[in-house]
Amino acid sequence: MLVKRLLLFIPLVLVLLLLQSYFWVPTYENQAAGNPNRLLTYIEGSSGDAKILNPILNADSSSSNIVAHVFEGLLDLDENLELRGRLATDWNISERAYLLVNPHHRFPDGTEVTGSTLLHRIKKAWLTGRDEGLKNYVQSMELLPSTQREETISLLLPNAQGKPQLKDVQVTVNVPARVAFALSQVDQDLFDRLKPILGKKYFEHFPFDELIRFPKELGKETEAALRVKFPEILPIGEHNPTIVFHLRKGVNFQDGHEFDARDVKFTYEAIMNPKNLSPRTPDFEPIKTVDILDPYTVKIIYKRLYSPAINAWTMGILPEHLLNDAAMTREKQDRGLSDEAQKSFGMRDSQFNRHPIGSGRFQFVEWQGDEFIHLQRFDEYWEGPAQYQDYFMRIIPDLLTQEIEFQAGAVDFYGAQPHQVDRYKSDPTYQWFSSLGFAYSYIGYNIRKPMFAESEIRKALGMAIDVEEIIQYLMYGEGERITGPYPKNTEWYDPSLPSLPYDPNGALKIFADMGWVLNEEGWLEKDGSIFEFNLITNNGNPIRKNILTIAQNAWKKIGVKCNTQVFEWAVFLSDFVNTGDFDAVVLGWSMGIDPDLYQIWHSSQAGPQQLNFVGYKSLRADELIVRIRQEYNRDRQRQLTHELHRLIYEDQPYTFLYAPLSTRVLDKKIVLVQKDANGKEDYQKIYPIKSGDHTFHFHKWRKLEFTPEF
């Protein structure tokens, strides 16, 4: 009898408890009830934990997300993707250039070249204004005497086992007299402008052997490798672009120490220190010197033309006083490391990487591995504190769990998958942002293969594919057509070019014009060979795998026989892409804001382990790519990128498919807070900027207790 009563009583108690919880457990709409701090806390879910919270060392997206809040660079990009000052208030780009005197050469009129005659003739052309470039840009010129310097040259040579190994060679360089130019802006054509004065062959025959001395016992292989570097060791015409940064005064790191020029120079030196193994080294390698002019002025001199270099200064600046040699020595001693451990101790071993201190809007509080990272706003930030008091990045590897937590109000942000977008767009609880990023997908053809050698054939293959069908059915409409190699939302992309049309009949006609005819089995055939190839991609990407099938069926309709294969990522890269041993691939690029496409499209980058793995080669494209990376005038750079875009569009080394849209979902109660001069607040709807980034104004976000009407 007691058991029967308990069986009746227990369910009744449970029902009453559940009914009571309905009244006291906060719903999504009033989730801040009983915890008003929730409105001042932003919580973001991340699929993976951070690795290292140091701006010169981190290389993963989770770490970068935190680093961007804690640290700040000299520059960043504004809403229109143009550089603006942050830790630097402003900057100036000019150039110092040098032309060596070549005593083995004669001027076009037969006169012997000497330092004085060289300077006189160039000055005459400059002062008379015979060349507009010299007249407009050159501010002064002078003749510098000959000098001598010692230099260590690092050569990459095979060791006894045939593996590449660095070998240092000490050389003595006798620098002849040279003409020094001061230019108001960078002019990559300076030395071409001088050729009518100098003669066309001035730069072809130069006595390097007389001016560069090295040990005689080097060996033939080492000597040959060194001689290749002679024009780099002693450039006949040398460009030294120069950036002078004026730093913001009164900026403090989050420990109260003032930021100044020493921190900028230290950050550069830390990046270039081989012991630190910084992935940022290639961005800063073009720098020749970093000179401190005063505590708030830094001069950066570059050793060659490389216009993308300025973008590197958007990276966060390190606090010198916390990571210099003295600080590292103290840390080693405080941690009681062994003598052996102290010898190998470097910045990668420092506790700073898990307890960072920067000068950004948020300061580090706590990091619980695989659980969360907690930041708190930095109230002394130079531009004023953020609206949010706390920021949490919670580690939630499973996307389904992320979505459930988001819908429950436990996290404030969710990156919707393409098939989920319509559902969120129709839900009035949320605000959403669908925008282009810097990525795109494509089918790449191995141009080394005879069947893909003709651009018309590659164009025909592209015309046979209905890209709109891919966007509609695979991407659920979350994508946009593209025509070329630049991100569509940058000024480098040429929007005037039409998308390749979906025209199977036109594609078939191109094949027919190229001598291909349909055989009895329905395959295109020429000289007894069927047009057949393999299309491959990596496993783990269902969209790419489905593109294989769509392309295969589309090509089958016009008589192209395509076989498809999917490989694990590591095998896909090592055995096929990196070796160039493939016919065609489905892949994608995640691009940056910079217009430099050297690694992907320049013909010199078409070898094994390089990124131009389709083997695209074009003399004009090479010229444009080099000019783009050496051009400092933004308008001229834009003209050059549009020309490169059109050239690649015409050659069709890729079938450019689409740029995916990224949809981010937020609670509607999160708003952008704007204040007028009197401090009166105005709530505005959050919006993405040109890059598609909706968090650009994150420091002005706040969560309200109510849902505003916009």
Image: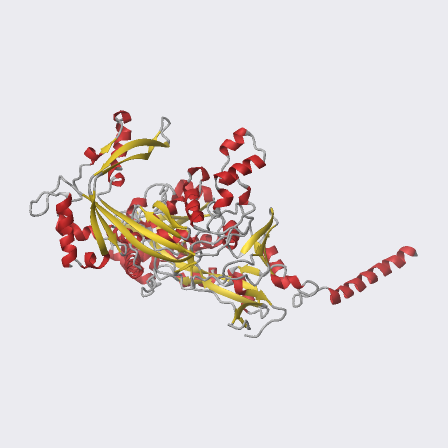
Relative to 339, does residue 59 appear above or below in the rendering? below
Residue 643 appears at what percent x and percent y? 27, 59
In the displayed image of the protein, which residue is found farthest to the bottom? 709
What residue appears at the point 23 percent right and 46 percent down from the top-left corner? 98
Quarter of the image where one finds residue 153:
top left
Image quadrant assignment for residue 671: bottom right
Name of the residue lying farthest toward the front? 294
Say how many tags the image has: 0
Q: Is residue 17 left or right of residue 535?
A: right
Q: Nearer the viewer, residue 123 or 596?
A: 123
Q: Is residue 255 above or below residue 694?
A: above
Q: Could you tell whether 360 is left or right of 111 in the image?
A: right
Residue with the most extreme left position? 109
Q: Position of residue 414 (x, y in %)?
A: 56, 60
- In this rendering, would 464 be left or right of 377? left
Can residue 588 be seen? no
Quick one: which residue is furthest to the right in this view?
1
Q: Is residue 667 left or right of residue 267?
A: right
- Quadrant of the image occupied by residue 333: top right
Nearer to us in this view, 282 or 416: 282
Q: Is residue 162 visible?
A: yes
Q: Position of residue 71 (x, y in %)?
A: 49, 52
Q: Quadrant of the N terminus?
A: bottom right
